[in-house]
Image (cartoon, rainbow, N blue to C red):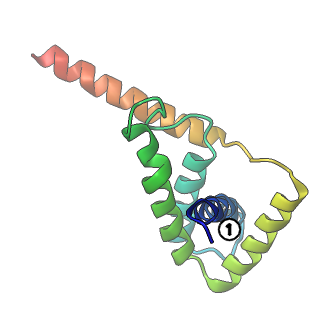
Amino acid sequence: MSMFARLRNWAQRIKRDALTLWFALRDPATPWPAKALCWLVVAYALSPIDLIPDFIPVLGLLDDALLLPGLIWLAVRMLPDAVLAQSRLRAQAWLQEGAGKPRSRAGFWLVAGTWLVMLALAGYLIWLR
């Protein structure tokens, strides 16, 4: 298998697992620590904006290439086997239907809120000088 094919396969698994977490979040059998991490990962993964914009060289792609896959991996590991299996089946069915990527308003507000807090903190530190 070529490197490009392996990379494409990895990206498809990441996309499927992000959607898997979306379904696991709604499953009552998901324990609350896993549910909390799933909420954070899903909110960020499905957010229409990034914490680190992609146009920033190197750093802009770090969240998509390292941070998000790492958090998805951790959240998947926290899920009970039955919830993970059922959620993966639902995610696979969703992707085969071509239903598209769900959006997260919570993710938008999570990222926008983080940016506002950072800007306020920067303004406060500048004001102190």
* Residue pointed to by mark 1: 24
Left or right: 5 in relation to 111: right
Q: Residue furthest left?
A: 129
> Is disc 1 placed on a helix, strand or loop?
helix
Find residue 127 and report its image quarter: top left
- On the image, the x and y values in percent for residue 117 come to 36, 30
Left or right: 112 in relation to 25: left
Left or right: 52 in relation to 88: left
- On the image, the x and y values in percent for residue 22 come to 68, 59
Count the marks: how many?
A: 1
Above or below for 46 versus 96? above
For the point 58% across and 49% down, the residue is 45
Quarter that holds the C terminus: top left
- Type of amino acid under label 1: Ala
For the point 60% across and 66% down, the residue is 2
Above or below for 101 versus 70? above
Q: Residue furthest right?
A: 97
Above or below for 84 versus 57? below
* Dot 1 crowding, Cα within 10 Å, few <14, some 14–19, many 20+: many
For the point 18% across and 23% down, the residue is 125
Above or below for 31 versus 67? below
For the point 58% across and 42% down, the residue is 107
Q: Which residue lies furthest to the bottom in this view?
A: 81
Q: Which of 7 and 86 is in front in this view?
A: 7
Quarter that holds the N terminus: bottom right
Q: Which of 121 and 4 is in front in this view?
A: 4
